[in-house]
Image: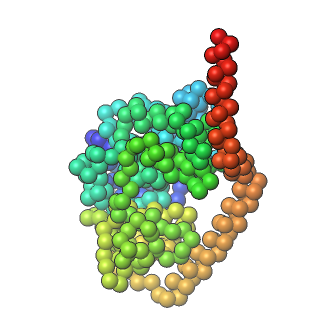
Amino acid sequence: MSNKLLIVPYFGKLPNYFQIWLNRIQLNNNLDFLLFTDQNLDNYNVQFRNLKIIKMSLAELKKNIEFVTGTRIKLHKAYKVNDYRPLFGEIFSKYTQGYLWIGTIDTDVILGNTSHFLTDELIQNYDRINGNGHFSIWKNNNKLNELWKSKGQNKYKDVIPFDLVRLLNANAAFDEYGWKFGKGISTFMIREGYTIQDTLSRADLDFNFSGFRSEHINQSMKNFAKIEVNKEGMFAINESDVQEIMYVHLQKRSMDVSRFVGSSENKFNIIPNKFISDDECITENEKEKMLRKFNIERKHRIFKTRRKNLFSDYIVLRMIMWFRSKHHGKMKKYKKNIKSMRRDIK
């Protein structure tokens, strides 16, 4: 048993590279994984010592969250689950006993060799590792597991409080740093004096750029051509340098899988935007086709996102946070006066 547990609720259609994701989990036996899903996994190899799978629907998870919060919440789409990640320590408390660290991982995160990065010596002096939600662990203690309900969130005019997050269908990025107009729990943690280790080498890919680009890597490796993956680890490669990375985050990328990458393969390359075998060559014509496909899908994704936001309570969220930023001081003064009046009446 590891001292670190990653919790993965996943609902809906699985990515076409899901078996690759599973295979990398098996190699990272320094971590335990707990997958809650409504999907049938009979066609996948999931018999790993460090993986436990529990059948659960989105509706069942919603009930569990409402039991913990003691109030009604919004959870109609699976992506909204991300906003409730800071509650996982309480929601899944019966599974987290005995673990020093708990956290989350997305199914579009392909792992390298995390044991080279998540050493006890390196992480012991931090409260959280990685402030973003796609891969993050935090200390499994009451103080951090209950931070989601801290009234201290209301001290900051740009922090989106959980009481607002639960009322909206829109994703508020509450589980991470948040957005320009509204900050999440990682920002709140830093302001409250908690420590976050956020410098580990990883490829959190820019989803608006067809090639591979990441800010969380050496400057000489900011743009790189491919990622080599094997049993020893994961390596970002460009013309002049090689750097080991903890993982690659393929967010919002449609990935093809070469027929030469077997279901049990743990030696392969990742290029924009395809999994290929380590000895497979891609022609310039194939690269041009993949680039055209990426650009078409990117334009479609942007249009779809904007249309969805236009007719969702995402606009409501932005308006509330704008009002909060303009009137935060007045609201605090008003609440203080109300409390004073109540004391006078007593």
Towards the viewer: 113 or 165: 165
Query: Going by the image, does 319 lie left or right of 162?
Result: right
Q: Residue at x 46, y 74 (%)?
A: 212
Q: Residue furthest top?
A: 346
Q: Residue at x 47, y 67 (%)?
A: 205
Q: Measured from the top left, where is residue 18 in percent x and y? A: 47, 58
Q: Is residue 146 above or below residue 321?
A: above
Q: Residue at x 40, y 65 (%)?
A: 216
Q: Measured from the top left, where is residue 343 in percent x and y? A: 63, 16
Q: Residue at x 51, y 68 (%)?
A: 206
Query: Would residue 195 be visible to someone looking at this image?
Result: yes
Q: Residue furthest bottom?
A: 284
Towards the viewer: 188 or 130: 188
Q: Is residue 163 above or below residue 282?
A: above
Q: Is residue 207 above or below residue 44?
A: below
Figure label count: 0
Position of the N terminus by quadrant: top left
Q: Is residue 205 above or below residue 156?
A: below
Query: Would residue 50 be visible to someone looking at this image?
Result: no
Query: Going by the image, does 162 lie left or right of 131?
Result: right
Towards the viewer: 56 or 80: 80
Towards the viewer: 84 or 300: 84
Q: Quadrant of residue 154?
A: top right
Q: Residue furthest left?
A: 121
